[in-house]
Amino acid sequence: MDLLNTLVEKGLRRELPTREEALAVLATSDDELLDVVAAAGRVRRQWFGRRVKLNYLVNLKSGLCPEDCSYCSQRLGSKAEILKYTWLKPDDASRAAAAGVAGGAKRVCLVASGRGPTDRDVDRVSQTIEAIKEQNEGVEVCACLGLLSEGQAQRLRDAGADAYNHNLNTSEGTYGDITTTHTYADRVETVQQAQAAGLSACSGLIAGMGEKDEDLVDVVFALRGLDPDSVPVNFLIPFEGTPLAKEWNLTPQRCLRVLAMVRFVCPDVEVRLAGGREVHLRSMQPLALHLVNSIFLGDYLTSEGQAGQADLDMIADAGFEVEGAGTTTLPEHRAGGCGSVCGGASPAGEAGGCATEPAAGAASDAGAGPGTGAPEASVPGARTDLVTVRRRGAGTDIAPNA
């Protein structure tokens, strides 16, 4: 296809596609899907080889968020029967993080539900960061705490944080349809605050919330404009008990087209496959590795992922390799961002961060994680058998999945 040849050439030059080209990727047919994956895979291999970076989530504070994000199981008024607990102690969080690092994770993402942290919360998280770094040499730490107030990004940076995650989630034009308690502009401002403090900015999206193709292109182009080093792509898992409980409209083919479009628009950034991959990509997950260069290992915030060993086997069986601790993630021309050794120069705007499932209100940044129960059986394509609420790891006495 001339379209794919053009997109590959642009991707290899880091040239922005046109909106029409991005929309055309989403409009390709299932018969063309393998060609689309192969083309985007060429761009992925140009900048990241066959490496896959592993990230690990630790949910520091779960549930009871005052924000009304429609996709989130921890939202105000959510009826999802998820784990609810207040702040983990630094040592407990560090032990949870160590499980992920032992499984091969290079980055630990610390997430807390809520609109945004108080100064006391920043102190708590700072102590946690210090404990994790002390016990896990060389690990990257990303914080995901919601909307930041003045000076908080710098305090996190001073405590040793390498990155900050705050997703845009959807287009500016439709943002008010999913959240009313904060604005799209609030999210953009938080990403910019993180960048200004020298933190690696991580910002991504959630697909499958009923948006149009134009909305997906809008948010990915907006992310390209913010220039994060990491873009997590989440796929909505409709929680029973949330407003989007019946939005079961994704197919594995649709998910792959979305990931390919993101790779073409953001060719040289860390594209992370995040929340919802097990539910929507299912047996097609290995194909996604040709498009993304980063995934979360094990469980998410309020939902369980596939076994950590299954993730490692999938990577090996697909012909990829886990990125080692001594390898820099990002291409040399993005060296200001967070590679494998974060914390050096002030990044222009990285992102390797957290995000993978609806964590918590404004802070959360993850797509949507599974909840209990299931939407009505009449919803076509609903795979509620794959939705499992997290009952292990952080906030429990059961060993984590890593």
Image (spheres, rainbow, N blue to C red):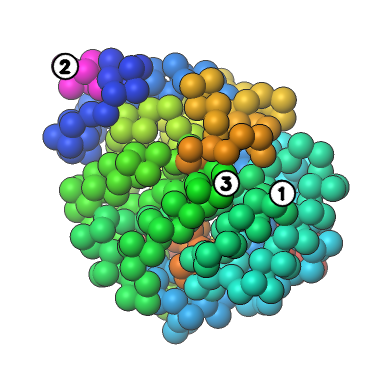
Residue on which the image places disc 2? 2
The magenta span reads 1-8
Q: How far, Cα to Cα, is label 2 from label 3?
A: 39 Å
* Mark 2 or mark 3, earlier in chain: 2
* Mark 1 or mark 2, earlier in chain: 2
Image height of 184 relative to 272, above or below: below
Image height of 399 relative to 180, above or below: above
Checking the image for residue 199, the label placed there is 3
Q: Is residue 199 left or right of residue 204?
A: right
Residue on which the image places disc 1? 160
Q: Is residue 59 left or right of residue 182?
A: right
Looking at the rendered image, the disc whose residue lies closer to the viewer, 2 or 3, is: 3
**Where on the picture, by quarter, is residue 144?**
bottom right
Per the image, label 2 sits on a secondary structure element best described as helix
The three-letter code of the residue at mark 2 reads: Asp
Residue 11, given in percent of the width and then of the height, sits at 33, 22
Per the image, label 1 sits on a secondary structure element best described as loop
Q: Quadrant of the N terminus?
A: top left
Q: Is residue 357 left or right of residue 27?
A: right
**Where on the picture, by quarter, is residue 94?**
bottom right
Q: Are marks 2 and 3 in contact (CB under 8 Å)?
A: no
Residue at horizontal 52%, vertical 67%?
A: 149
Residue 301, given in percent of the width and then of the height, sits at 58, 61
Residue at horizontal 73%, vertical 67%?
A: 124
* Mark 1 or mark 3, earlier in chain: 1
As rendered, which of 63 and 121 lies closer to the eye? Answer: 121
Residue 56, given in percent of the width and then of the height, sits at 65, 48
For residue 9, say whether it is visible: yes
Q: Is residue 219 left or right of residue 365?
A: left
The three-letter code of the residue at mark 1 reads: Gly
Question: Callout 2: 10 Å neighbours few (<14), some, many (20+)?
Answer: few
